[in-house]
């Protein structure tokens, strides 16, 4: 294989975007909408007088970005430590060994099954950050199956991205958007369920196509030159023992508890971190690690998450810079104004473009809904697009773009866990996004034609 051109580290790329965000703040006029709570009031954008960002804001904003992302950063450290404790008992490696024995000749089952599960969790209860601990486990499994880390992260993030883009019941995206648009909550979900199946199938096909190329030619891997010799290897002893089976029971019960907590109790990262810590304590006890062994394993696992935590905090800094400069509302207002006067089909497609661009600056799904939907809902009325279609355009623009934009802290964190350079990931996911955006465009045009409500 010809040597690949050296690409900058993901942290270098994000730092460059932080600097670019500050430069943009000197060009774009500062402005803001009036707000009713978190919702913007349409037609109220006005210019505001703010002091230009100081020359060194791109440096001073980094601690602010790390602070703003503290909840997910601490969750990552805790999850990394807990997975390390569980793995030190040998239970995870025994499970991987069993999976290898059953899936060695059938990797399609792994890809289809896991993408489906991750998509379902994202579509119904809005799971995303909760998937991060699965990345190192899947990387280990995929490497053992003669696949690579791109397949592993693809399974997790394509599943989550499709689940968000076609969410049927996600309380953090579609239900917020429907509430803002004045629609009955969960209305129109039959169409979204159908789209979820179609888009998940496209994602599985894309991942499997790449996986088949790898099994025929390992040198075709996008990360063939990345060192995976440490951190993802399996020990010689992968037998199931009574202790390891007991640890797996603890792990399964813990995962079941936090799925219940997210779905029924509204738990988020603080509660999930507590559940993970409980898993670690019980696993260490039944797995026979002892207090010192458990502590060493926890510290080792948390330390391995440092690069990932930094990527998350730096990515969050981009939004911090744009917010301090007060140019995010300016960007949204300018994009929305570009849709005025368009015919209905073109307006629906334009909404998809606008929402996709907005996601670069507002990577939070709920945050994007609160900022854009109060504008898009009345704009839909003026252009002959149903409000349900406007919500669908928001979902597509938020969910699909999440798989690519480097301002998405969760994506950058998962790429860090998988040791995948951002440019290599983009080479993998952009062709998939082209397919998914074609489906999105067809769906939106059909929604306009059929008066989707």
Image: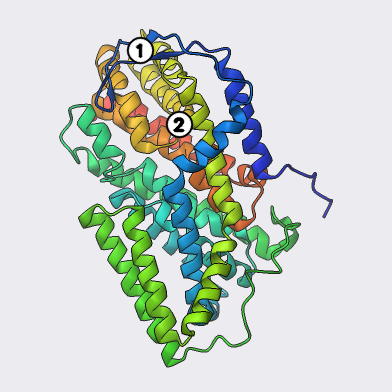
Q: Secondary structure at mark 2?
A: helix
Residue drawn 72% across and 58% down?
Answer: 226
Mark nearer the viewer, 1 or 2: 2
Provide the residue designation for mark 1.
343
Provide the residue designation for mark 2.
359
Vertically, is 105 above or below 385? below
* The image quarter in which residue 148 lies: bottom right
Residue drawn 55% across and 68% down?
Answer: 299
Vertically, is 229 above or below 283? above
Q: From the viewer's perspective, tell me whether residue 17 is left or right of residue 265.
A: right
Residue drawn 74% across and 43% down?
Answer: 7
Q: Position of residue 382 (x, y in %)?
A: 27, 12
* The image quarter in which residue 62 lies: top right
In the image shown, does 226 or 286 lie closer to the viewer? 286
Residue drawn 36% across and 7% down?
Answer: 341
* Residue 237 appearing in the image: yes
Real-space Cα separation, disc 1 to disc 2, in angstroms: 24 Å
In the image shown, does 251 or 299 lie closer to the viewer? 299
């Amino acid at each position: 294989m010809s040597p690949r051109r050296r690409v900058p580290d993901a942290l270098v790329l994000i730092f460059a975007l932080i600097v670019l965000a500050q430069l943009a703040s000197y060009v774009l006029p500062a402005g803001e909408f009036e707000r009713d709570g978190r919702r913007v009031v349409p037609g109220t954008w006005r210019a505001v007088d703010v002091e230009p960002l100081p020359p060194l804001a791109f440096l001073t904003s980094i601690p602010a970005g790390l602070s703003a992302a503290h909840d997910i950063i601490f969750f990552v450290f805790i999850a990394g430590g807990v997975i390390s404790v569980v793995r030190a008992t040998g239970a995870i490696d025994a499970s991987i060994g069993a999976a290898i024995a059953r899936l060695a000749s059938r990797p399609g089952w792994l890809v289809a099954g896991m993408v489906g599960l991750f998509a379902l969790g994202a579509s119904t209860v809005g799971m995303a950050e909760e998937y991060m601990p699965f990345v190192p486990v899947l990387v280990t499994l995929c490497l053992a199956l003669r696949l690579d880390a791109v397949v592993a992260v693809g399974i997790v993030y394509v599943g989550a991205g499709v689940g968000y883009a076609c969410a049927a019941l996600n309380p953090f995206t579609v239900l917020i958007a429907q509430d803002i648009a004045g629609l009955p909550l969960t209305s129109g979900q039959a169409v979204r369920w159908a789209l979820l199946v179609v888009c998940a199938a496209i994602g599985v096909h894309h991942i499997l196509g790449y996986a088949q190329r790898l099994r025929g030619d390992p040198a075709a891997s996008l990360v063939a030159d990345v060192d995976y010799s440490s951190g993802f290897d399996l020990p010689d002893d992968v037998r199931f023992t009574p202790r390891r089976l007991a640890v797996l029971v603890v792990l399964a019960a813990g995962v079941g508890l936090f799925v219940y907590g997210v779905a029924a109790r509204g738990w988020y990262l603080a509660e999930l971190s507590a559940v993970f810590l409980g898993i670690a304590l019980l696993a260490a006890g039944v797995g026979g690690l002892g207090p010192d062994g458990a502590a060493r394993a926890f510290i080792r696992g948390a330390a391995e998450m440092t690069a990932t935590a930094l990527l998350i905090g730096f990515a969050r800094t981009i939004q911090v810079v744009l917010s301090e400069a007060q140019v995010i509302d300016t960007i949204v207002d300018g994009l929305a104004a570009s849709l005025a006067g368009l015919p209905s089909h073109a307006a629906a497609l334009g909404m998809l473009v606008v929402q996709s661009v907005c996601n670069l600056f507002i990577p939070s799904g709920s945050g994007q809904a609160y900022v854009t939907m109060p504008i898009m809902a009345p704009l839909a009325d003026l252009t002959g697009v149903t409000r349900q279609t406007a919500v669908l355009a928001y979902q597509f623009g938020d969910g699909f773009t999440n798989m690519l934009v480097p301002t998405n802290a969760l994506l950058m964190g998962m790429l860090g866990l998988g040791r995948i350079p951002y440019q290599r990931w983009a080479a993998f996911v952009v062709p998939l996004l082209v397919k998914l955006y074609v489906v999105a465009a067809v769906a939106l045009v059909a929604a306009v034609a059929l008066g989707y409500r």
